[in-house]
Image (spheres, rainbow, N blue to C red):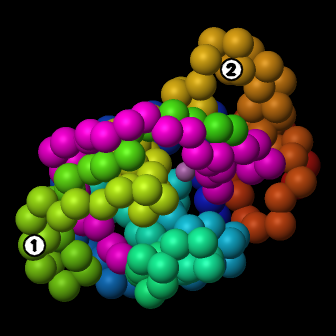
Amino acid sequence: MLPIVAYGHPILRKVGEEITKDYPDLDILIQNMFDAMYESQGVGLAAPQVNKSIRLFIIDASPYEDEIPEAKGFKKVFINPIIHEESGEEWLFNEGCLSIPNIREDVERKSIIKISYYDENWQYHEEETYDGVLARIIQHEYDHIEGILFVDHLSNMRKMMLRKKLSDIMKGNVRVDYRMLFPRLKKGKR
Ligand code: CO
């Protein structure tokens, strides 16, 4: 399994590069990303989280299918996406991130998005509209390719309260049952 890059790694702060159809072994990368995402029980995974600074993320929202019918079979690849517009009410949703294990926080975002992107077959999808949980997952993953993490959206007070936990994650002082790449792991420790 591809290791998931942990909080504190500089690649998570880079703005991803667009890719072209001749990007090497894209199919394999996408397959490996799905494997890593399922292995770590995520609903979304962005390329920077597997150490690739490119504009690509994947989503499989089916774990939410009991709560929202649209999540059923919602398995998608987003290449070179652009969110054109965010609208609607701001609402709170409890977010987590495979790069920031064991932290979940309520995050406020707008409820509706308009997005254009290419799928894994390089079909162009123009200005598709999503709302609710699906929009939320897309917004979270889209942030990753812009170098933004969900904890950035929290109040300074919440950020301060998470400081110790975040620094532990960087050092690998965290219990997690999938493979991770920790930026500040001391040699000889695992
Ligand atoms: Co994330």
Please say if 108 is above or below 187.
Answer: above
Kind of residue at disc 2: Lys
Dot 1 beta carbon under 8 Å from ligand 1: no
Name the residue located 69 percent from the left edge and 70 percent from the top edge.
Answer: 40
- Whichever of callouts 1 and 2 sits on the residue coming sooner in the sequence is 1
Residue 96, how many percent across, how many down? 65, 49
Name the residue located 16 percent from the left edge and 45 percent from the top edge.
Answer: 84
Q: Quadrant of the N terminus?
A: bottom right
Residue 143, how many percent across, how many down? 40, 43
Q: Quadrant of residue 151?
A: top right
Q: Quadrant of the C terminus?
A: bottom right
Name the residue located 63 percent from the left edge and 12 percent from the top edge.
Answer: 156
Q: To which residue does mark 1 refer? A: 124
Residue 23, how many percent across, how many down? 21, 71
Name the residue located 19 percent from the left edge and 42 percent from the top edge.
Answer: 85
Mark 1 and mark 2: Cα distance apart in space: 38 Å
Q: Nearer the viewer, residue 71 or 126?
A: 71
Work out whether residue 10 can be spotted.
no
Which numbered disc covers residue 159?
Answer: 2
Q: Dot 2, how many residues are within 10 Å of its Cα: few (below 14), some (14-19), or many (20+)?
A: some
